[in-house]
Image: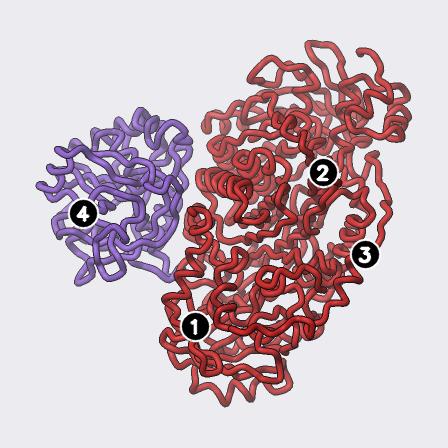
Amino acid sequence: MKSPTNYNDAESLGLLREEFDKICQILNRKPNFTELSIYSVMWSEHCSYKNSILWLKKLPKKGSQMLVEAGEENAGLVDIGDGLACAFKIESHNHPSALEPYQGAATGVGGINRDIFTMGARPIAQLNSLRFGELKNNRTQWLLKGVVRGIGDYGNSFGIPTVGGETFFDKSYNANPLVNAFSAGIMKKGDMISAVAKGAGNPVFIVGSSTGKDGINGAAFASKDLTEDSMNDIPSVQVGDPFQEKLLLEATMELSKTNTLVGMQDMGAAGIICSTSEMSSSGNCGMKINLEKVPTRQNMLPHEILLSESQERMLLVIKKGKESSALKIFKKWDLNCEKIGEVTDGDMLEFYFNNELIASVPSKSLVLGGGAPVYQREYKEPEYYKEYKNFRISKILPPENIIQVANEIIKLPNIASKKWIYQQYDSMVGTVNMGTNLPSDASIVNLKDTNKALAMTVDCNARYVHADPEIGCAIAVCEAARNIICSGGKPLAITNCLNFGNPYDPEVYWQFVKSIEGMKFACEKLNTPVTGGNVSFYNQTVTKDGAEPCFPTPTIGMIGLVHDKEKTMTLNFKNKGDLIYLIGDCYDDISSSEYLANYLNIDSSPAPFFDIESELLLHKTISSLIESGQINSAHDVSDGGLYVALIESCIANNLGFDIFTNHDFRLDAYLFGESQSRVVVSIDPKKKKIFENFLKNKSNYTFLGEVSNGKIVIDDMDFGNIEVVKQDYLNSIENILES
Amino acid sequence: MKFGVVVFPGSNCDEDAVYALRNILNQEVVKLWHKDTNIKDVDFIIIPGGFSYGDYLRSGAIAKFSPIMNEVKKFAADGGFVLGICNGFQILCEANLLPGTLTRNINHNFICKNVFIKSQHNLTIFTENTGDKNIFKIPIAHAEGRYFADEKTLQSIIDNKQIIFKYCSKDGEINKLSNPNGSLKNIAGICNIKRNVFGMMPHPERACDVNLNNTDGKTVLSGAIEMFKNMGK
């Protein structure tokens, strides 16, 4: 073993002095450079969750629907009936995408899908949640184009449909975009592959791409601020190969049907060291690994082989004696598969290079829940929080020309159609996307050969979270649930992607803590356990003038089940003459609305009005309306308010609406306010009486007017024709990108 | 009647084609692995969409050298019926079983959306038996789908009525606006001169399942199947 290291070495690798002391204690000696590198990545924020785990543990994770709870495997597993289970998860790839948007985003898609199929589930659909800076900036446009092409090229080739997502623009993301990728997969209950190593003497194999120098120290890179020098970290960005991933998928699916595997884990952050330590630790064993056996693309040092984050690789433990049947499958798919070591008793991970022991560390000491450090961070309420609460709508003059506001709102990048983005994703491969021809609030995925469909959505209005993290995050969870409810589904569980600034900044950490509290509150009320996800800190840009955190963005990915797919509800108006109702209460509230923030350019306001009990009542009301076949469409009121919800309901069938507003409220608040827990529904006029009777003792409702053949009329004012508004809605992002 | 669906390692519409044929159109289907050197006893071969071997070089550029393609060529030469969809169309052009080529879309982007296509005559099994219907809503999903051929080739496929589908508007207008990818003459699908090898960029197998609320693809495929059977095949 080579020469021992010291504090300076530790600090240069991003470890604290106290962490170095802890390593010495664990090893009972000073670590050598390879060992120190191992701890630096395994104890990085990205792998160890050291600054977040105490709070994550507070989130609800139990439920009768759960087959595998958060933290037990690569992803959570939910029972969806018919002998099927759904594995789903969301993950960030923010830092790589900020430097190299194409590969950063592509490998994010690859990573999340590997998490799913490593468990034995075949991915069935993907979503993504993206945040960019102001769209008018050249850099934003470069990032947007790169990220979209990266997601598209990888996902399209891999062959799993991208069925939905969200994109949000705000100046707080100017330097640090967020790229969160979601994947859901289906397996037969009981077919799960565990990420575990067991049984001394069982061989350990590496399969997939050769190992190269790409992505070395990626996990450590993701665990620090982005600065002006971050371009020097470009070698930390990995390169994706979707074809290789497709081969791995098919081979894994075949392998899962044989009785050859002990366990398997994909190699994501921190490569071989992460997969060997996590698999060994969960099986209470050790491993002896010969690093020279790892197929490499170039000459590499042992610590580089250990830490490389080259993509499309898996670590497998195979039952001794069954090697040949596994190898046969890999050969069929032309995949490179090499034995690199074996499972040992005890808990030591021993890495050899040409018979020389180059690192020897206890597996448990490296991992979350084992020896990895856990920190309680300080937090402090930021000053802006109270300031925002001083906002009064009375200080804002009502607009002189409401029609002009409406025309502009529809073109705002956060409101306008994301067609330019989603048309670059194959949304139809797999022939399961039920939203292509009839859109719903959530993405609806057909579960072939059953009566069911899977509903899925990603949601987070980060402006609300910034204004009030606790309420904003609760809203994110509820909006996700509302989308599933409005589609005829029942929410089942969530995964989260927690994108925040530097955790050592007490005000950032306060945003994190309050978000967790809001998420916990909402998830408990909705009975949607948290199945896992990931935390991405350090999403801020450090310049000469200090650190600028991006909006706190706890993205919620939710799945739900439509029990009878015949009853899937869609969002678009169906017939001229249908009556339009608003279910839920109205308020004189424009706080944190798109109208206030991006039309009036006022940043300082609290989160919009939100009351959990009204939200829950709304869910019950909408579900019973759908169940009893009373409505023709349902669409929730979210970004852009009632006006935008109405317009979105008109797009698919080129219809319009003729409505009257309620003069108890300001017209701008009525049309563009974003107070929560409201849904627009349309009904057959013949059902008016039954419908109104049905709603007695349920949510409050307002009769708005009726569906027209294309004219948009509000309070007898002519807002134009849907044909014109639709062109603005569909093309404004493309127009900005091309101008 | 037995269909064979070719499976390259990067095919990703193979299962969709099998599902549409077997579960929706009630046909017998077998998969033909790319390393196979025998075509079994199939009556009709489908080369599905996807990214055959990753297609990093050029769509279909490697697939044309695969063992199964030798068999497909022999099968077609003997008059066997072959349909290439999307990547399958690209492969058939690369393998010279169909004239012309598919180049990068005019906007340089991958495009996935519903488009409308119009059959150009009733001289193939795909266009002869669709009743009064000659405009179909079928999705596309490709980055390299812009049909191109040199002037001479183009003239000959026009003269020989080898163009089977053109991109059109909802109402059947064939113009620049209804051309999603910049294809010459709005070409969406063609056949060979013997009318037994077909290629189209739109995905009929994606428009078969009533659960997805569009069955125009089923109309095209089931019409062809019936014609094929009527021919005594």
Mark 1 vs 3, N-terminal side? 3
Q: Residue A32: give its label.
A: none
Which numbered mark, 4 or 3, is in the foreground of this view?
3
* Residue that carries the numbered disc 2 in the rendered image: A542
* A280 vs A603, nearest the viewer: A603
* Residue that carries the numbered disc 4 in the rendered image: B164
Q: CA distance from mark 3 to mark 2?
A: 21 Å
- Which chain does the numbered disc 2 sit on? A
Going by the numbered disc 3, the residue's amino acid type is Glu
* B130 vs B41, nearest the viewer: B130
Taking A13 as reference, is B117 above or below it? Answer: below
Q: CA distance from mark 4 to mark 1?
A: 36 Å
Q: CA distance from mark 4 to mark 3?
A: 68 Å
Going by the numbered disc 1, the residue's amino acid type is Phe
- Relative to A246, is A618 on the left or the right? right
Q: Residues within 10 Å of mark 1 (few under 14, many from 20)?
A: many
* A562 vs A178, nearest the viewer: A178
Q: Residue A383: give its label.
A: 3
* Residue that carries the numbered disc 1 in the rendered image: A573
Colour assigned to chain B in the rendering is: purple
Which numbered mark, 1 or 3, is in the foreground of this view?
3
Mark 1, secondary structure of its residue: loop
